[in-house]
Image: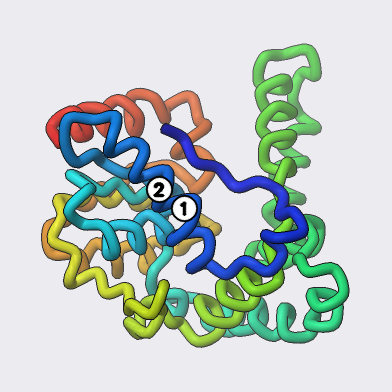
Amino acid sequence: MLVDWDKPGPDERRFTLTDYIAGPLEAALTQARLMSAGPIPVVGYCMGGLLALALAARRAADISGLVLLATPWNFHAERVAQAESLARAVAAAGPLLETYGELPVDIIQAMFSALDPFLVTRKFIHFSQMDMDSQSALDFVALEDWLNDGVPLSGPVAHECMGGWYGRNTPHQNIWTVGGKNIVPQDIDIPSLVLVPQQDRIVPPASANALAEALPHAECRNPRLGHIGMVAASRAKPVIWEPMADWLAQH
């Protein structure tokens, strides 16, 4: 079962992370659990890893294994000033969030582009040197279409993620709460696989490694891939997907 974000409708514009996790995400887990013969593994990528972790903290008896790909935890492990600037940017966008109820995709993209301002320039310079009829060029365009097909964040989620996670580092401080429960990885007694790509420019490896260190039953692997490459590169299948499938089969 795959759970994905979608554009928030009129009701979802008021959703917090608790509404998402304790609502549709737990409902999906309940349905998947009913369809299985026992507890099931859960996989989360990037922000989805944090949601999966919160799900595991709340519903440990229903989860047999937890796989976290490029999942941030210590948001102040590196580039603290940039993390705090994201929080200030969302705070400054308060009137926009109040008016529209959501943080638009273009603003989200601009915020995260600021984490590595020259990344876009470098990759399009590389693209300009390709044969435009080559498979590499076609793959580049397909990947860019996927990367830019984002959805807005509801206003409360934007404040919680940018202000809480990035600004106050609430996950690593063990003060991030979902439904009144502190999400503390040290208390999650579930076999876990944490994949931390070495070349990640979106989630610093030190941030994700902090989560691997906090989980009591975690196996950490550090593939030589980037944040996007770990799911979309040509090497992702043998380096990420096949080993992950083997691990899931054991749990």
Query: Is residue 249 shown to the viewer in this render?
Result: yes
Residue 205: name its quadrant: bottom left
Dot 1 crowding, Cα within 10 Å, few <14, some 14–19, many 20+: some
- Residue at the image point whose x is 26% and y is 57% from the top: 59
Instruction: Name the residue tied to disc 2.
Output: 44
Where is 249 relative to 73, above or below? above
Dot 2 crowding, Cα within 10 Å, few <14, some 14–19, many 20+: some
Position of residue 13 measured from the top left corner of the image (x, y, whole percent): 72, 64
* Quarter of the image that includes the C terminus: top left
Instruction: Name the residue tied to disc 1.
Output: 48
Position of residue 102 measured from the top left corner of the image (x, y, whole percent): 76, 65
Kind of element beneath mark 1: helix
Measured Cα–Cα span from mark 2 to mark 1: 5 Å
Position of residue 234 measured from the top left corner of the image (x, y, whole percent): 48, 24
Q: Nearer the viewer, residue 60 or 49?
A: 60
Position of residue 153 measured from the top left corner of the image (x, y, whole percent): 68, 61
Residue 42: name its quadrant: top left
Q: Amino acid at mark 2?
A: Gly
Q: Nearer the viewer, residue 118 or 170?
A: 170
- Residue at the image point whose x is 80% and y is 19% from the top: 132
